[in-house]
Amino acid sequence: MFFASDNWAGVHPDISANLSRHAAGIATAYGDGDLDRAVYRRFSEIFESDVQVFFVATGTAANALSMAGLNRIGGIALCHSEAHINVDEFGAMGFYTGGARVMPVPGPLGRINPQPLDKAIQRYSRDLAPGGQPMAVTITQATEVGTVYTVDDVKAIAEVSRRHGLPLHMDGARFANAIAATGVTPAEMTWKSGVDIISFGATKNGCWMADAVVIFNQEVGKDLRLLRQRAGQTFSKARFISAQFEAYFTDDLWLRMAGHANAMAARLAETIEDAPAGRLAWLPQANEVFAILDRARAEALQAAGAKFYEWGVPLGFDGHLGDNEAIYRFVASFATTKQEIERLGQLLA
């Protein structure tokens, strides 16, 4: 019963097999091989646009390098107050940018509200006041609390960003889950809605280690190749990242895996909601489920082998927690099985 994180899941067999297939022989290094170029073209096909692709080791590196590519003197990135870039990356953005800062913006259940975003940007004048200057807006898709921005939501954020002359970045560590949940195309969710650059994650969704920065707007991130090199994020044997992405995109494997994870999360949510010993904190929209449990019951589940984490109360939570209750996060992955969920349901009952 492994629900701690989709990072705990292994690798899809097709991706492992493709790595083995490309393990022998000689290939041009540093992302300039035939396979690498084929994968870059595949990204462009998926996003229906001529994009630039830069492989990196982690989602944190993708976010921090994206911000470095968008940085301005005295730069300030505006994000949700509970975004990964703000609370989980140990100041990586400031390290990679040489001092840029984060300006948290509120919003219910992980999503930035356009009105507070507009007010937050207006706090800074355009004449390089000592407070700094906004450099970008970044949103997380799917969010840290399992909610999803709709296309209209993204467009509303982009409209505010554009009005203030700011590029829009998307942290897509769980982008596949958001696409599978909404049914829109990757293009519709990104550049067609005003996104300029995305941290595209695949590691959480069945890969060994495959993340990338994908640039839609060629006017931003012009120095990203140099920034990546300086940050030590340029892979010499990039073909092994490309081999993962090649299999990842073949026959829509990435969407099938994400769809399975979302379906398992929905099944898990039903199991928790039906159990007498738990209830949902809010409705899941992707592959993360947040439940309210009595602490003693949660400890009993963990003692029985269930892996999951306690979670803080997010902005916009309108439920009620009893004196001995807490919110707990359960994450489904491509590898989650019905049997795991049934076993958890038995324990909850």
Image (tube, grey):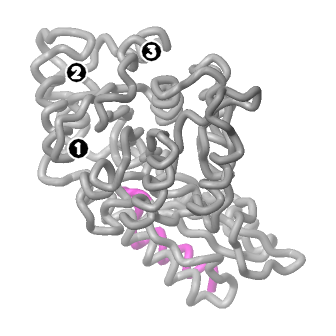
Q: Horizontal and vertical percent for residue 340?
A: 47, 68
Residue at 31 percent across and 35 percent down: it is 217
Q: Horizontal and vertical percent for residue 114?
A: 56, 61
Q: Horizontal and vertical percent for residue 279?
A: 65, 83
> Pointer 2: residues within 10 angstroms few (<14), some, or many (20+)?
many
The image's mark for residue 239 is 2
Magenta span covers which residues? Answer: 333-349
Q: Are marks 3 and 1 in contact (CB under 8 Å)?
A: no
Q: What residue type is labelled 3?
A: Leu
Provide the residue designation for mark 1.
Answer: 248
Observer-nearest of 188 and 287: 188
Observer-nearest of 266 and 182: 182
Q: From where the camera sits, is residue 8 visible? A: no
| Mark closer to the chain start, 2 or 3 | 3
In the rendered structure, the answer to whether residue 137 lies left or right of residue 295 reads: left
| Mark closer to the chain start, 3 or 1 | 3
Observer-nearest of 114 and 34: 114
> Is residue 348 magenta-colored?
yes
Residue at 48 percent across and 25 percent down: it is 65
The image's mark for residue 227 is 3
